[in-house]
Image (cartoon, rainbow, N blue to C red):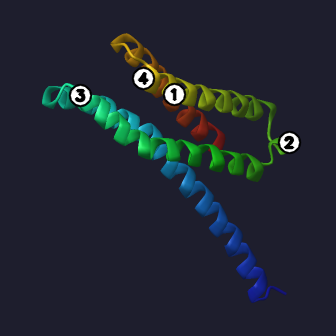
Amino acid sequence: MDGPLSHHAGSLADTLTAVRLSLHVLGAAVWVGGQIVLAGLVPTVRKLAPEGPKAAARAFARLSWPAYGLVVATGLWNIAASHPSAQSGAWRVVLFVKVAVVALAGLAALAHSRATTRGGLALWGSVSGLTSLAALVMGVLLAG
């Protein structure tokens, strides 16, 4: 016999899943989407003020690093909820590669923030953006 408590317990698990996935998507939207938007704005901001891109980058960092932390934290929560040992070998390989790519994205973003030359900024910004996009695609693959 299904009572109100058994129905409530099922909806609670569904609610936690929705919270976990929503937070993960929110963090990825800010981290990945923000990089794309900022990259698109840099030429215009540079025309407005030569130091504008640095100021915009500092402002973005105040949002993006907490978002990256949220992505990592909810990513670990996602891994625990997905029971990797019950998944296929291919799924586990993609997961391993995704974790490595997420780490590389963070390291590249850190290198970008510390770069002092235009070439370094371009290189590390590109690496961070591309690895962030790759991690997003792998996340979609893992979810499917």
**Between discs 4 and 3, the one toward the N terminus:** 3
Q: Which one is in front, 123 or 54?
A: 54
The numbered dot on residue 85 is 2
Is 73 above or below relative to 12? Answer: above
* In front of the other: 59 or 131: 59
Q: Position of residue 52 (x, y in %)?
A: 23, 32
From where the camera sits, is residue 133 visible?
Answer: yes
**Label 1 vs label 2: CA separation?**
32 Å
Q: Amino acid at mark 1?
A: Leu
Q: Position of residue 9 (x, y in %)?
A: 75, 77
Q: How far from the left and from the top, in percent, is residue 69?
A: 58, 45
Residue picked out by circle 3: 51
Percent coordinates x, y for residue 98 in the rendering: 65, 31
> Residue beneath label 4, please?
125
Left or right of 100 in this view: 41: left
Q: Mark 4, residues whose alpha carbon is within 10 Å: few (<14), some, or many (≥20)?
A: many
- Cα separation between marks 2 and 3: 50 Å
Q: Quadrant of residue 61?
A: top left
Q: Residue at x 38, y 17 (%)?
A: 122
